[in-house]
Image (cartoon, rainbow, N blue to C red):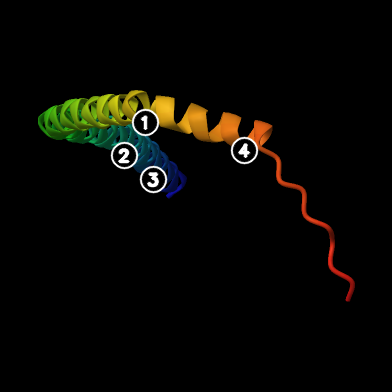
Amino acid sequence: MSAQNSAGIQKLLTAEQDASKIVQKAREFRTKRVKEARDEAKQEIADYKASKEEEYKKFEAEHSKGNEQAEAEANKEAEKQIKAIKEAGAKGQASVVKKLLSAVFDVKPVAPAKS
């Protein structure tokens, strides 16, 4: 009977060791799979980020051309207005100087009124 018990106990120990190996392999597989999933997710995020960055640059390039064109037109208009202001200043410069000199040299003093 003791041999039978000993054989049964040995069989149980062997089964327990086999089960322990299976559990260990399952844990290793799970750990490996979690790492792979994390790496795959990081790669997907990087790909998505790159595609969105490319979209943004394309959008920016398309719309900045319009801004450059509008800026050039605004500069052109500003130059026109500056030129017109300078011409108007040059045209009326003589009369303005004459009026200023007249105001300075033709002083007409007025006595203050008592209140």
Image point (20%, 31%), residue name: 77
Q: Amino acid at mark 1?
A: Gly
Q: Amino acid at mark 2?
A: Arg
Mark found first going from the N terminus, 3 or 1? 3
Q: Horizontal and vertical percent for residue 52?
A: 19, 35
Give the quadrant of the C terminus: bottom right
| Numbered tag placed on residue 30 in the rendering | 2
Q: In front of the other: label 1 or label 2?
A: 1
Image point (36%, 31%), residue name: 92
* Residue closest to the eye, 36 or 75: 75
* Residue closest to the eye, 43 or 29: 43
* Residue closest to the eye, 46 or 65: 65
Mark found first going from the N terminus, 2 or 4? 2
Verify CB contact (< 8 Å) between mark 1 and mark 2: no
The span from disc 2 to disc 3 (Cα, nearest Å) is 27 Å
List the residue tagged with mark 4. 103
Residue 94 in view of the camera: yes
List the residue tagged with mark 1. 92
The span from disc 3 to disc 1 (Cα, nearest Å) is 116 Å
Q: In front of the other: label 2 or label 4?
A: 4
Q: Pick out the residue farthest to the bottom.
A: 115
Q: Residues within 10 Å of mark 1 (few under 14, many from 20)?
A: few
List the residue tagged with mark 3. 12
The local secondary structure at tag 2 comes to helix
Verify CB contact (< 8 Å) between mark 2 and mark 4: no
